[in-house]
Image (spheres, grey):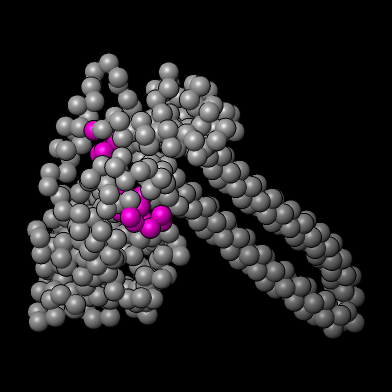
Amino acid sequence: MQLAAAALPGLPGDEVPVALRRVARFAPNRRARLGGREIAAQLAADPLFRQRIGSRAVSDAGDLGSAVTSGVAPAAADPVEVAALAYLARPDGWRDLIDAAGDAVRAEADSAAIAGQIRAAEQRATRAEHDRAVARVEADKLRDELARVREELGQLREEARTTAKALRDALAAQKRATDLVKTEQGRASGKAQEHEAELRRLRSRLADAEASAATGKQAAKDARAVDDARLWLLLETIGQAASGLRRELALDPSEKLPADFVADSAAERPGAPERSRARAQDTDDPGRLDQLLALPRAHLIVDGYNVTKRGFNDMSLEQQRKRLITGLGGIAAQTGDEVTVVFDGAERVHGLPPAPRGVRVLFSKKGTTADELVRQLVRAEPPGRPVVVVSSDREVADGVRRHGAYPMGADSLLRRLSRS
């Protein structure tokens, strides 16, 4: 589409179709974005126009255009550009060039996904090895401590034998050894008490070490579970996106004729006004919100009171929550997307109805705001998953955008709910 849009102004005025003359006057950076659908429809419906655009694009491409017209795709060329030139110029074997370009794009995507999985596995293995090394060091320390205690116990036993011998001598000496015997007995008793106290301290340390080890094992297990869930969700999102791309690029020359493609294109947009497509770029436009919710495995996160106080401020907080949650249930049923709505939890909430199917209702904990909880939800998602955050708070929008989410204004959701 970029090639066709760039070549369009170079055609003589009488060779530009009437439907595209307005598009040809657009600025270069807006021509493909705002007039892409009209250009695509004209390329599919008008072979002569496509031939003229193809000749112009091949000429602008230089050596790459010459190679494509001869049916050859250079190895270092961008596969997407090769596919676009082949579609416009249509040399012998152009469908094979497009199929080869699609295979190259899919191979690059698969290689990137596999490399990411390998890096994640290596990181988990490194963390596990580090944990094992720490556990071995702690075990060595405990063994050294146990050896020291045993040595002290042997010394105490030797001292006890010496004391007993001295006691027997003192008894034989009777009164002359009475004071000495009492002294030795007192010293032996003190040593025994110290020994018992040391044993109790060591038992306490051993119990603490065992509790710490159990806590570490549970934390590692929970971390692995979170990583597995994020990895599964990312792979699911990538798989659905790849399936959509395969369906979009698949061409079957033996079953459809050019007229069939024109009919399919017309059926997908019956009388849709051009102005609505331009407005879809506004963050408060429900059309833009619908486009984002149509992405595979999308997750819609809503800043609850930010939306309700903007749209239902004349109601009580309970009625505001009920109306918003009910409307989000309809969106979840229509799109099949994951929906989470977050409210500030400073006040106690009574009589909250059960959440609709597919809608998760959360209240922030004491000392935490709903804005902070929204940012935590966004950071918890794996990179690459479409996450849409609805809030008119600029700080929230800027924060979630830095983490790869799509911020939308509260008015976009209110307009979307009013259509339902």
Q: Is residue 352 left or right of residue 3?
A: left
Residue occupying image coordinates x 66% and y 51%: 130
284 versus 90 height, above or below = below
- Of 380 and 162, nearer the camera is 380
298 versus 375 height, above or below = above
Q: Position of residue 290 (x, y in %)?
A: 22, 54
- Of 167 and 415, nearer the camera is 415
Residue occupying image coordinates x 19% and y 77%: 310
Q: Quadrant of the C terminus?
A: bottom left
Q: Main secondary structure of the magenta part?
A: helix
Q: Position of residue 81 (x, y in %)?
A: 47, 37
* Residue 29 belongs to the span the image colors magenta: yes
254 versus 7 height, above or below = above
Q: Image quadrant of residue 115?
A: top right
336 versus 313 height, above or below = above
- State which region is magenta: 25-45
* Residue 108 belongs to the span the image colors magenta: no
Q: Is residue 296 left or right of residue 257?
A: right
Residue occupying image coordinates x 24% and y 61%: 279
